Amino acid sequence: MSRKKTIDQAMLFKETEKLIMESGYSGFHFKALSARLGVARSTIYNYYTKKEELVTDYMVHLLEKAVAQMDNVDKKEEPVKELIRLWSKYANMHQMLQIMPYIDKKASPMVEENTKKMFDLFIKMKTKIEETLKDGQMKGIIREDIHMKTIVGLVMSTVQIPVHHDTLDEWVNEVYQLLMSGLKK
């Protein structure tokens, strides 16, 4: 079987995420990635010289997509519920971000730049969540007696809740109900 000569970024990012989720950061290397993609390692090196560059570039891409989609949350009937739905689409983001301590942030200028972009995007994400929640407070649907950073953290942590439902909508509805009503009977 002949090997593919080129790869597109979407395919590269998809397989990068899969390999990291399956093998962890320490098990992620271009040899394994090239085998999954059916290309020679040199093909990947045409795009990235180090695995840190590829991984951080992918994480910037993922965060940019999430932040861009957050712009539409406030236009929905139930913005907080829409935040939870959006988080469910990016469930792997939390696990991907957990590898950051293992990445040599000075591996190359590209890695340094991507790390800065990721930090800036993460701040944007938190700010957008906070704005949505403050709007909910102004509308009287979100409590004002709990510190905003606590509420933001709670919303952001919903991505870690396992899905034990037949559909994602059931999970979103249940998490939303729990978040808005609490554990009180």
Image (spheres, helix red, strand yellow):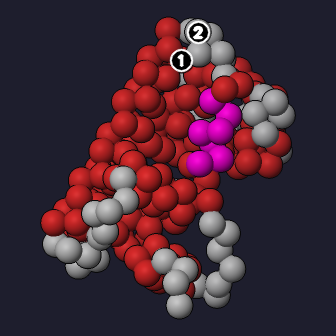
Q: Earlier in the sequence, mark 1 or mark 2?
A: 2
Q: Looking at this view, is 34 or 141 the one in front?
A: 141
Q: Quadrant of residue 4?
A: top right
Q: Is residue 143 above or below residue 51?
A: below
Q: Residue sitting at 78 percent across and 39 percent down? A: 24
Work out which residue is located at the far front of the displayed protein and give it: 145
Classify residue 147 as left or right of residue 78: right
Q: Is residue 153 above or below residue 85?
A: above
Percent from the top left, x then y, of residue 39?
Answer: 73, 34
Classify residue 3 as left or right of residue 107: right
Magenta-drawn segment: 94-100
Which residue does the numbered mark 2 point to in the structure image? Answer: 106
Q: Looking at this view, is 179 or 63 the one in front?
A: 179
Mark 2 residue type: Lys
Magenta region, main secondary structure:
helix
Classify residue 179 as left or right of residue 27: left
Q: Quadrant of residue 81?
A: bottom left
CA distance for labels 1 and 2: 6 Å
Classify residue 146 as left or right of residue 154: left
Q: Residue sitting at 37 percent across and 36 percent down? A: 123
Which residue does the numbered mark 1 point to in the structure image? Answer: 111
Q: In what element is the residue under mark 2?
A: loop
Work out which residue is located at the far left of the displayed protein and give it: 138
Percent from the top left, x then y, of residue 61?
Answer: 45, 39
Q: Residue sitting at 63 percent across and 42 percent down? A: 96
On the question of residue 70 being in view, the answer is yes
Q: Does the magenta portion include 98?
A: yes
Q: Residue sitting at 22 percent across and 66 percent down? A: 137
Count of marks overlaid on the render = 2
Which mark identifies residue 2?
A: none
